[in-house]
Amino acid sequence: MSLKIPEHVAIIMDGNGRWARKRGLPRIAGHYKGAEVAEDIVEFAIELGIKHLTLFAFSTENWNRPKEEVEALFELLRRYLQTKKDKLYKLGIRVRFIGRRDRINKELVKLMQEIEEESKKFKNLFLNLAVDYGGRDDILRAVKKAVKLQREEITEELFSSLLDLSCSPDPDLLIRTAGEKRISNFLLWNLAYTELYFSETLWPDFSREEFLKALEDFSRRKRKFGRVLDE
Ligand code: FPP
């Protein structure tokens, strides 16, 4: 069977904490290993010809974690972006951040804007990083924008264009690791017809092989989008 390459893959990178605990390490060690895995999957996605990749790095609910973990996660993100931005450009990656900006440290927001601006010209891969992102929050912000437009008719197309992920098509495949089978307030609107794939593997143990397994599974799916398929 030939491998179907989805145009857009979204990933909920779950299980970092459990991975660390199993090794008697602090939870943040799992996040650091998780970031390395994310980096490798980004490179692999380019090699495979995937055009859009969306990674859930920090949710609107993650603020409820212990303060030290929240701070350490943002420090990891800042460090990663600072040290890897040139590599991202070299790989021809266009980076966009989805989610709220108003609760994130101003310096980090500046760095995020700089990377979005600098990477605008690239198109090998559209990498969307979800930071302080929640699906309901995204929809609510879009509703507020829609109300301001005072249009007589608001179509699905118009509404989609007001959402954070307006520059990417809806994900074809969502992967969630670490055994949990939920959406957890990720891209609620955009996942309407997305194929879901759940892996038992903890994110820090996720690999190119595991990613290929997900793509093989995706290749076997019959996507109907609510229609009847001809036999
Ligand atoms: C879920 O694991 C993971 C997160 C909340 C953070 C994900 C962040 C990264 C992988 C690193 C940052 C990414 C980039 C792109 C630099 P969990 O802590 O909920 O694990 P658990 O369910 O085992 O506790």
Image: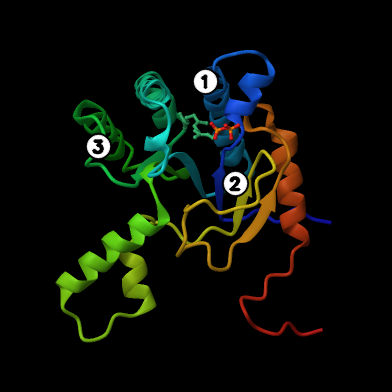
What residue is shown at x 65% (from left), y 24% (from top)? 19
Amino acid on which disc 1 is placed: Tyr
Which residue is denoted by mark 2 in the rendering?
49
Q: Is residue 184 left or right of residue 135?
A: right
Pick the residue in front: 117 or 22: 22
Pick the residue in front: 160 or 123: 160
Q: Earlier in the sequence, mark 1 or mark 2?
A: 1
Q: Earlier in the sequence, mark 2 or mark 3?
A: 2
Q: Does the image show residue 124?
A: no
Which residue is denoted by mark 3 in the rendering?
113
Q: Residues under labels 2 and 3: Cα distance?
A: 26 Å
Within 10 angstroms of label 1, few (less than 14), some, or many (20 or more) residues?
Answer: some
Within 10 angstroms of label 3, few (less than 14), some, or many (20 or more) residues?
Answer: some
Give the answer, above or below, for where 228 lies relative to 211. below
Where is residue 93? Give x, y as percent: 43, 38
Give the position of the C terminus as an image quadrant: bottom right
Determine whether the residue tagged by mark 1 lies in a helix, strand or loop: helix
Amino acid on which disc 3 is placed: Gln
Which residue is denoted by mark 1 in the rendering?
32
Determine whether the residue tagged by mark 2 lies in a helix, strand or loop: loop
What residue is shown at x 38% (from left), y 58% (from top)? 136
Amino acid on which disc 2 is placed: Gly
Q: Quadrant of residue 115?
A: top left
Determine whether the residue tagged by mark 3 lies in a helix, strand or loop: helix
Mark 2 or 3, closer to the camera: 3
Q: Earlier in the sequence, mark 1 or mark 3?
A: 1
